[in-house]
Image (cartoon, rainbow, N blue to C red):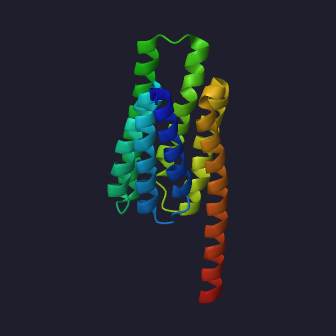
Amino acid sequence: MTHEQIGMILSLIGMTVSILSFQFRKKTLFLLAQSIGSGIFLISYIFSGGGMAVWLNVVYLIRNFVFVRLDKMDEWVKRKACFVFWGLILSVYVIYTLSVGEAFPEAVWSFLPAFGSLFSSYAYTQTSAIRLRLIKLVDSACWITYNLHIGIGALGGTLCELFSLVSIAIAIWRFLRQDRQQTAVQS
């Protein structure tokens, strides 16, 4: 089996875990599943030479575990952590772009996943499961656009984000329905 084949198999496993993560209402379980998915994606990108995606997934792992620990903290603490991760994400983007010497148009395309990551970091400051997922829609849109630009080589990533959008929509629908049922029972 080649490195690329191993990377593809791992990315399919990471995709499955990431897609299913949106169905967890409890933020801790959601972030744990996101971390597992990011860890598997990290390894898959190492096998397939994923460039900046490797470093973004390292940031995701750290960020997810930090936000699990901060979940019960004050909103201001979560926002400060968000600012730290915004700085880290932007630093990863700048360092990666400068180190590989990307031309301007390609550097703009490479900014899309980093831009989406800024939104997902902000999403993790949310206490509402629905609001978190609504903000994550922007993250998925950025990754889909980036993956479509790359082409067939990013087919797995494109499919992952398309299925994630569907999973997010289903989760929002389920959570809204559960909230309405709870409100009706309490009335």
Of 47 and 83, the residue lying toward us: 47
Q: Compared with residue 171, is residue 96 higher up or lower down, i.e. above or below?
A: above
Q: Quadrant of the C terminus?
A: bottom right
Where residue 126 sits in the image (x, y, percent)? 49, 56
Q: Compared with residue 133, is residue 180 higher up or lower down, i.e. above or below?
A: below
Q: Compared with residue 109, is residue 137 higher up or lower down, i.e. above or below?
A: below
Residue at x 58% of width, y 16% of height: 106
Where residue 24 sits in the image (x, y, percent)? 51, 63
Where residue 40 sits in the image (x, y, percent)? 43, 42
Left or right: 105, with 41 as reference point:
right
Residue at x 64% of width, y 68% of height: 174
How many numbered discs sit on the rendered protein? 0
Residue at x 32% of width, y 56% of height: 69
Residue at x 62% of width, y 47% of height: 137
Left or right: 187, with 95 as reference point:
right
The reply to whether residue 50 is in sight is no
Of 135 and 151, the residue lying toward us: 151
Q: Compared with residue 164, is residue 88 higher up or lower down, i.e. above or below?
A: above
Where residue 111 sits in the image (x, y, percent)? 55, 26
Name, please, the residue furthest toward the front.
Answer: 1
Left or right: 26, with 135 as reference point:
left
The reply to whether residue 119 is in sight is yes
